[in-house]
């Protein structure tokens, strides 16, 4: 069962592509909120994000599980970042261009495509990885321990004593 929980974090660039717009808008949001660093909610979000990012590089075999809650903090920071970007655009864009640049259907389309890319990429990657259930090269199992290995472990548990040492090749 332990081998089924091995979830190493992928390459850093896959992480950046996977989180896509959340990283950009979340970074803007974090810099916007840095002035309010005495607020306990902001301290909590910043700590949550920092600890999760550190846990992603700690060499635990289940480190990808630490990204589960990271998206919540990124989404909150992203909402603040998008509001900050919109306020900046409203203040700096001349009146005649404001209606074109801040056209609601265009903004909604950009947000759906930009933030939806994360889900589309993750779902596509998971479909490909789960389709390669038992690849020919090492490791021979990515997500599931093969039934033959589980049967061998069950046989050993039944036919050997508790503290026996078994040598295999």
Image (cartoon, helix red, strand yellow):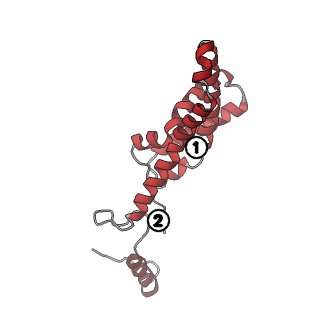
Give the answer, above or below, for where 22 lies relative to 38.
Answer: below
Residue 104: image location, x then y, percent? 63, 30
Pick the residue in front: 61 or 88. Answer: 88
Q: Mark 2 points at which residue?
A: 4
Q: Name the residue under label 1.
A: 71
Residue 97: image location, x then y, percent? 58, 17
Q: Which residue lies at the image location 61% right of the left edge and 27% below the top edge?
A: 103
Of labels 1 and 2, the one closer to you: 1
Give the answer, above or below, for where 22 lies relative to 138.
Answer: above
The first of marks 1 and 2 along the sequence is: 2
Q: In which quarter of the image is the C terminus?
A: bottom left
Q: Which residue lies at the image location 45% right of the left edge and 57% below the top edge?
A: 126
Pick the residue in front: 99 or 49. Answer: 99
Q: Is residue 143 visible?
A: yes
Mark 1–mark 2 Cα distance, whole angstroms, equals: 23 Å
Residue 73: image location, x then y, percent? 62, 39
Q: Which residue lies at the image location 41% right of the left edge and 59% below the top edge?
A: 129
């Amino acid at each position: 069962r332990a081998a089924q929980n091995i979830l190493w974090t992928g390459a850093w660039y896959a992480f950046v592509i996977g989180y896509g717009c959340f990283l950009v808008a979340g970074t803007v949001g974090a810099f916007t909120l840095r002035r309010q660093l005495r607020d306990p909610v902001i301290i909590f979000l910043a700590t949550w994000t920092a600890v999760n990012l550190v846990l992603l590089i700690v060499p635990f075999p289940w480190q990808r599980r630490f990204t589960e809650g990271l998206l919540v903090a990124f989404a909150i920071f992203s909402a603040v970042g998008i509001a900050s970007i919109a306020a900046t655009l409203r203040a700096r864009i001349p009146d005649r261009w404001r209606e074109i640049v801040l056209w609601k259907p265009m903004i909604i389309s950009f947000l759906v495509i930009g933030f939806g890319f994360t889900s589309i990429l993750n779902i596509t990657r998971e479909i490909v990885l789960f389709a390669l259930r038992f690849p020919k090269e090492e490791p021979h199992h990515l997500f599931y321990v093969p039934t033959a290995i589980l049967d061998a472990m069950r046989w050993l548990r039944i036919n050997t004593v508790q503290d026996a040492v078994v040598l295999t090749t």
